[in-house]
Image (cartoon, rainbow, N blue to C red):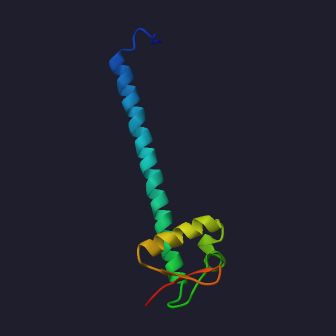
């Protein structure tokens, strides 16, 4: 058998190992980010498919009406709606103590 002592490991070997580990972590995070983006896009398109033109929806209406959003918190759905508003896909209307989101035709 062959054993390696700590004196056999060079600085170059150590750096090569660290670089490999860093690239593995980067590729793992890249996959995680892509999956999160795919989920984010899926949720936004599902919400837009659910909404009827010129009908006002509250965040609670979206949570109750869209199956994909039923497990999400009010805060997360609000963030999705804010992103849709920023992209110009929906408009926000303020009622008495209530926010309504509408899709324009």
Above or below 79: residue 64: below
Above or below 78: residue 32: above
Res. 2 image quadrant: top left
Above or below 88: residue 75: above
Could you tell me residue 32's position as x and y percent? Answer: 48, 52
Residue at 39% over, 21% down = 14
Above or below 17: residue 72: below
Question: Is residue 43 in view from this perspective?
Answer: no
In the image: residue 42, left or right of residue 74: left
Question: Is residue 78 in view from this perspective?
Answer: yes
Could you tell me residue 105's position as x and y percent? Answer: 43, 90
Residue at 43% over, 79% down = 89
Numbered disc total: 0
Residue at 53% over, 89% down = 52
**Most extreme residue toward the left, as rendered?**
12
Which sits in the foreground, 79 or 66? Answer: 79
Could you tell me residue 47's position as x and y percent? Answer: 53, 77
Which sits in the foreground, 56 or 19? Answer: 56
Could you tell me residue 45's position as x and y percent? Answer: 48, 75
**Most extreme residue toward the front, as rendered?**
96
Residue at 66% over, 67% down = 71
């Amino acid at each position: 058998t062959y054993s390696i002592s700590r004196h056999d490991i060079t600085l170059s070997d150590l750096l090569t190992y660290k670089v490999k580990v860093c690239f593995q972590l980067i590729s793992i995070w890249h996959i995680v980010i892509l999956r999160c983006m795919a989920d984010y896009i899926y949720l936004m398109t599902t919400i837009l498919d659910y909404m009827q033109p010129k009908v006002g929806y509250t965040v609670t209406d979206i949570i109750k009406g869209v199956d994909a959003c039923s497990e999400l918190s009010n805060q997360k759905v609000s963030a999705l709606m804010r992103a849709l508003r920023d992209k110009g896909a929906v408009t926000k209307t303020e009622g008495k103590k209530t926010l309504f989101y509408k899709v324009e035709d």
